[in-house]
Image (cartoon, coloured by chain):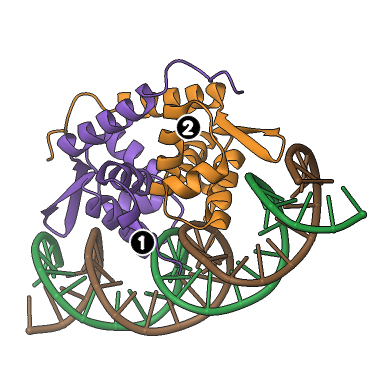
Chain colours: A purple, B orange, C brown, D green
Amino acid sequence: MGVTQTHLYTEEQNEIAQLAKAIAHPARIAILQHLIKTKSCINGDLVLEIGLAQATISQHLRELKDAGLIQGTIEGTRVNYCIDSEKWDALKSHFEDFFQSYADGCGPAC
Amino acid sequence: MGVTQTHLYTEEQNEIAQLAKAIAHPARIAILQHLIKTKSCINGDLVLEIGLAQATISQHLRELKDAGLIQGTIEGTRVNYCIDSEKWDALKSHFEDFFQSYADGCGPAC
DNA sequence: TATATCTATCGTAATATTGCAATAAAATAA
DNA sequence: TTATTTTATTGCAATATTACGATAGATATA
């Protein structure tokens, strides 16, 4: 128990859910918005910007990285993170399709 | 520890994250897609459609209800659930705005 | 080389989520 | 009234997430 039974669902359902989970934390939303605003940033910036510990920010960054939403390039002692535009577009169109599937309002039974 | 520090973030960031969390499970995606397809359905249908126990489905339905994404109307011994179109549109435009904010690709540092 | 800076990882604690059996609650049917 | 049907709730176990201090690793600077 306690573990999501992914085999019960379609690949699409699992993928949408996984992408949603990647952005299902306000710190990760804040990180993405900051990345969008500055177009590149480092872990240290985020520690000041957001009020979390360095280890926690690093953990959130890795989750976004694992989801493929961001990329990090090492620059000296720092790391420049930025949005992965391909994955971002994939996420975007996935959600657009999902939202688009509901268009005609509620059925007669409601 | 272990609890999300919502006070660190803007209301918008918390709201997007919360809505994302509501759809961050394949069972809930499957439920929403089924609701969209049939335009109304009941818990029992979903138990057959998805392979989860009745209690588990009921739990997921409540999470979607708590998020405001679905409504349930009692019909005899059954409950007709359907999408809440207002909240759906709110979710949609929230995500659209979020995705739209990233448009010009990666900055010079990447 | 020694020190400082920046990020990742490890270990740990607290809390949340997922899933199900058992049971309760509420309405219908016999 | 007494089943029957359908959904919600409770209680529990397993797993996942969130957060942070301590520490390791890697690079730059004195």
Q: Closer to us: mark 2 or mark 1?
A: 2
Picture quadrant where residue C29 is located: top right
**Front-most of D13 and A81?**
D13
> Which residue is labeled 1 in the image?
A54
Residue that badge 2 annotates: B35
Question: Is residue B80 placed above or below B52 in the rendered structure?
Answer: above
Output the chain of dot 1: A
Left or right position of B75 against D29: right
- Mark 2–mark 1 distance (CA, rounded to whole Å): 42 Å
Residue kind at label 2, given as amino acid type:
Leu
Nearer to the camera, B59 or B74? B74
**Residue under the image location 37 percent in, 29 percent down:** B98
Q: Residue at x 46, y 28 (%)?
A: B38
Give the x, y percent position of residue A85.
17, 34
Q: Secondary structure at mark 1?
A: helix
Q: Residue at x 21, y 34 (%)?
A: A90
* Place of residue A20 in the rendered image (x, y in percent of width and height, measured from the top left): 37, 43
Question: Within 10 angstroms of label 1, few (less than 14), some, or many (20 or more) residues?
Answer: some
Residue at the spot x=54%, y=36% of the render?
B11
Three-letter code for the amino acid on which mark 1 is drawn: Gln
Residue A96 is drawn in which quadrant?
top left
